Amino acid sequence: MADKLDLIPITEWGFFTLPRPMVIAGPCSAESEAQVMETAKGLASFGIHMFRAGIWKPRTHPGCFEGIGMPGLKWLQKVKETYGMFVCTEVANRDHVQACLDHGLDMLWIGARTTANPFLMQEIADALRGTDIPVLVKNPVSPDLELWIGALERLNRAGVRKLGVIHRGFSAFQSTTYRNDPGWRIAIELRTRFPELPFFADPSHMGGDRKYLLELSQRAMDLGLEGLMIESHCNPSQALSDAKQQITPEELRAMLCEQIVVRDADSQSADYRDNIDQLRARIDVIDENLLSILQSRMSVSEKIGAYKKDHNIAILQMGRWDALLDDMVRKGEREGLDERFLRSLFSVIHEESVRIQNVVLWEKEK
Ligand code: PEP
Ligand code: MN
């Protein structure tokens, strides 16, 4: 397992520059030459340098638009020639890689479904051996950090040194506000382990709806990520894939130029990733996770309350609690946490748990 990746800094790839955010934009799918060219024109008009468009689309169900395939690569070439933009697309096997190299694409990305497949990742890595095209790796669909790192390692061992990641959230069984759970803590963990790895967020696939784009993009910037990949279409409501989450180039311009606030202590200094705003943003994510953990714990307490009531068991069994508390304190101390802090924290949690169980008891007796 690698604890270091051999990387070429993103500012040396030839198309991304500071200040943040570095932006990749373009439609979910290349649909027609006219749609590709019109969207690219809109994006180029306010300085977007990196154009994205899906050529082969990994759709959940068969029968949906599965991408235009090879003809779309010619349209991307035309975007390069006409607007001087750089172009990128998603690859999912060695044939895609070869076709992209043959058509002079500037960058590739690996989709979430492919990152999750070590066989395909190895095939793609082998196809990239000896080339120097940059590759961005989206997180796998499940929140599996090691699988994500494994995909990066395969590429890096094959000599891909212009390497970065795109965080697009994780599939969830239950529907949540967002299409994909942001799971920011996993992104933070990856960033902590590989601080030099260029980091993009994909608020389009994370949110699944254009109404969440600004808040998710802002969160990515507050966490200090380098860039954003955003889906933009000249006519979003007519898009053949991901219509709900795409915005027009003009809407993207307004969001980037007028709405997002990007703070950098000093983007030139070596420790800019650790400025106070970014550390606070990390704390916010951790606190949100604490809230959801507390909520799960209290809902289990509620069930225990009902169970005790049904079986006529007293709510408080002090002997059991004392033993549990001692055990938690021992575990916490091993993690470097203070004993007094742990005792008072768990006492408050326990008190609340007893209160909830009492409420259940009371409600049931009414
Ligand atoms: C895409 O970028 O259009 C795409 C299919 O994304 P993901 O792999 O994140 O689902
Ligand atoms: Mn899409």
Image (tube, grey):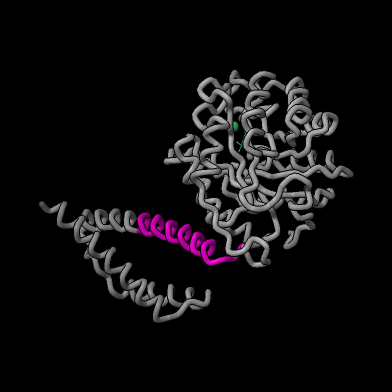
Examine the structure image and report whether residue 285 is included in the region drawn in magenta: yes
Q: Residue furthest right?
A: 130
Q: Quadrant of ligand 1?
A: top right
130 is higher (above) or lower (below) than 149: above
Residue at 37 percent of width and 55 percent of height = 296
Q: Position of residue 31 (x, y in %)?
A: 65, 21
Examine the structure image and report whether residue 159 is included in the region drawn in magenta: no
**Magenta residues, as a range?**
273-297
Q: Which secondary structure is most common in the magenta stretch?
A: helix
Q: Is residue 317 left or right of residue 338?
A: left
Which quadrant of the rendered structure holds the N terminus? bottom right
Q: Toward the viewer: 117 or 194? A: 194
Above or below: residue 237 compared with residue 227 = above
Q: Position of residue 273 (x, y in %)?
A: 61, 62
The foreground one among 145 and 96 is 96
Q: Residue furthest front?
A: 45
Image quarter of residue 59: top right
Residue at image location 49% in from the left, 78% down from the top = 333
Q: Quadrant of residue 253?
A: top right
The front one of 64 and 7 is 7
**Relative image position of residue 123 (x, y in whole percent):** 80, 39
Residue occupying the point 42% across, 57% down: 288
Q: Which residue in the rendered view is the most extreme toward the left? A: 366
Residue 76 seen: yes
Q: Residue at image x 61%, y 41%?
A: 229
Q: Report x, y in % for residue 169.
A: 55, 44
